Structure formats: C-alpha cells, structure tokens
Amino acid sequence: MFEYDIALSFAGEQRKQVEEIAQCLEAAGVEVFYDNFSKAQLWGNDLYQHLSAVYQKKARFCIIFISKEYAEKAWTNHELKAAQARAFREKGAGYILPVRFDNTEVASILPTTGFLDFRTEGAAGICAAALEKLGKVNVARSAGTSSAPAADPLHCDSSPRALILSKELGVTLFPIISESSWAEVIDLSVEPEDKETDSVLTKFRAQKRGMLVAYGLDVAEAELLSAVRSTVRGAALWKLQFKAQKMDFRNDMEMGTSGTSTDQFAEMRVRRLLLNEHLPQLDNSDGDNLALMNNLMRENLIQGLNPTIAVKESLFLDLFRQLGSLPRSFLESAWISAVVGLKLSSAVEHIDYLRLALAGTSLSIQFSGHRHRRYSNVAPYRIEVSGQLSLTQ
C-alpha cells in the first residue's frame, strides 16, 4: 500500500503550473506528494533521504515534469535518480510518467517513452490523464465526456498564506509564509511560488507606505521597513519587515435604529461578507423615493459609518473568479481575506473560529466571533454564522 497515489517532481520555474495540477488531483481525492502540501512532514527532516524514499518507495506513480531547468538542477536530478531506481526494479512498469514543458532531452528517459506535452494538454489535461491512469475517472475520449466520483470537500481552518496589499500599487499578494513574528514590528519570511510574486515583492521596495498586511488572525495597516531578497538552494527567500501603524479597527461611531441595534447591523455585515446576504436594495424603478431613502439609510448602517473597507458583497465571489481553477490556493486566500474583511469592516474584534470547506463551486462557512466590549459588566456581542455560498452567482 502506497502513501501517495502520485509524486510530482519539477523545477521551481514551473511551480505555478504544477501547483494547478496538484490542486486538481487533490480535489479529486488523490493522495499527491507536492512539497507545498507536505511542509510539516518535510520540516526538520533530512531532505536528501526523505525525498529519496518518497520517489523510490512511497508513491504508486511519479510524474516527471521535464524542462531545461529540470535538467540543470541538482535536487531534481536527485529525485529523478530515485524514481529511476524504482522503475529499474519494476522493469519499467509505467512508474515514471513524463510531461514536457519544452523539448529538453533527459538522457536517462528514452525518447521512445510515451509522454504528455503541457503546451498542448494544459493543467486540466494532465490532471485528467493522471486520474484516468489511477482509475479514478472513466474517460470516453471519442465522445468527449468524462465522469468522476465526487471528491470530499477541501477544508481550511487556518491559512499558511499572508495577505499583503499595496494601496499605491493596487496589488494584493497571497504568499505562503515560512516564518513569522508579529508585534509592533512584523517580520515575515516568504518563499515566492512564481516569478510574478518575486517581481511584485521587488516593486514593494519603492512603495513602502500605505501597506496592509495580515497573517493568521492578525491584521495591520503598516509601513514596509525593509525587503531583503536572498537565495537558498537556488530558490528566492524574502525577509519582509513592517512597522505596524494601526491594528485596532473598532468603530466607536456606529449607529442603530429604534428596531435594529448596532450589533445587529454588524451581524448583517458579517452575513453579507461571508454568505452574500442582506445585499443593497437601491432600485428606485418604482419611483418610491421614501423607500429609497430608507434603504439608503439601512445600507449605510449595514456598511458602518466611515469603515476602513465597505462590504458591498461577499468577497469570496470575486476571489473565486480569479483563483477558482486552483481550489487550495483559493481556499487559503479566501480564509485570510475573510479575516481582513471581518476586522477592517469593524464587524468583529475577535475571531474565535473560521472554517471554510470547498466542494466544487459550493463554499461552506462556519464562523464564530465577538465584537468589542462596550461595558465592563456586559459580555461582548457574539456573532455566529453557518451556511453555504454558491460561488457562481
């Protein structure tokens, strides 16, 4: 019995494309070895021995992503040699599944070996072929149809990603954080997943003010003090340091009405942000100006007076349009975005529990948090939300 259905071996230059394949496989219920999915297992291990064991013994199949960069790197060659040792023992047996990114030849893989070409198949095609190889889908290629068993939902109770936003550049990043410390001075270590992230981090150096940074349950408006780039084993590593300028986003200028308290309006804000409920009702096609004025007042109170951010719809919808093809990245980015939205909209002061689960285009949300304490002898108002959101609205 293998620990993994498939192990992926690739060069860092192709990480973005390989991650899309890894997430597609995971969403279909495949046990896949992809380094970013196994950070805890890799942490503190002798990587030379650990990776040798993975590629020789622990996977049913191994996908080798061939590229110019793959052929040049020491670590990928180590992984390839381990996989070849397994293939030699099994007299081939289709263990190594090569995928080409370019026309680079790898001497140890015979040119007569069947391969797939990423340039024509794309991530979806590679994923579909791998699922067929594993017997997890039945593909009728002549009819152009396929059927796959329903996969278990992907869950996210916390995110390994930070949210870093530059207001001046109008750019938001969701980098994976390898190390952090959070106080008045915030330190984050980032290993860029692709060249685009590396490039944007370089641009941040010239736009140090007007930054927003969040990680875990912490959010701050901040100034970037330094951004130091180094190289570790051929991969970029950034050390970012911020000075927090604001970490308390309570709003003491809230208003309620005779029938709805400020806390109840805040709960509507939470439900809008998470579940896309209590949306603006500003249609005046019937010419009822009084109703329009009442709806405008209600809308202002749901958004809150002078909020840091105004919540007009669920933040998950636009994010899914951008990252829906990468389920795990979407889920992790959605989790930290929700933390930011909940705090910057002054909806809650503390988040006690936030769980997201993604099944196809349906997002299940469970949330519990509380607002700031107004009176020392009265418990803070608690908000609990549970429900499902269709991401294709």
Image: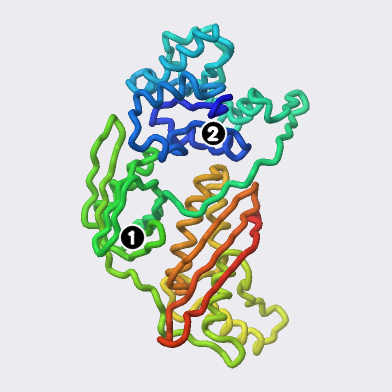
What residue sits right under mark 2 in the picture? 21
In this rendering, position of residue 364 left or right of residue 144: left
Q: What's the residue type where badge 2 is placed?
A: Ile
Q: Residue most toward the bottom?
A: 258
Residue 32 vs 325, above or below: the answer is above
Q: Nearer the viewer, residue 137 or 164?
A: 137
Q: Position of residue 118 (x, y in %)?
A: 53, 26
**Which residue, as the protein is rendered here, is positioned at the far right?**
143
Q: Quadrant of residue 94?
A: top right
Residue at image mark 1? 168
Type of amino acid under label 1 = Glu
Residue, x 62% and y 73% (percent of image)?
A: 278
Q: Secondary structure at mark 2?
A: helix
- In the rendered image, which quarter contains the C terminus? bottom right
Q: Mark 1 and mark 2: span between their CA atoms?
A: 34 Å
The front one of 200 and 132 is: 132
Q: Give the image quarter of residue 68.
A: top left
Q: Position of residue 207 (x, y in %)?
A: 27, 56
Rendered-image quadrant of the N terminus: top right
- Location of residue 115 with respect to 3 vertically, above or below: above
Q: Is residue 188 left or right of residue 105?
A: left
Which residue is drawn at the image coordinates 39% and 47% (left, top)?
A: 175
> Label 1: few (<14), some or many (≥20) within 10 Å?
few
Which of pointers 1 and 2 lies earlier in the amino acid sequence?
2
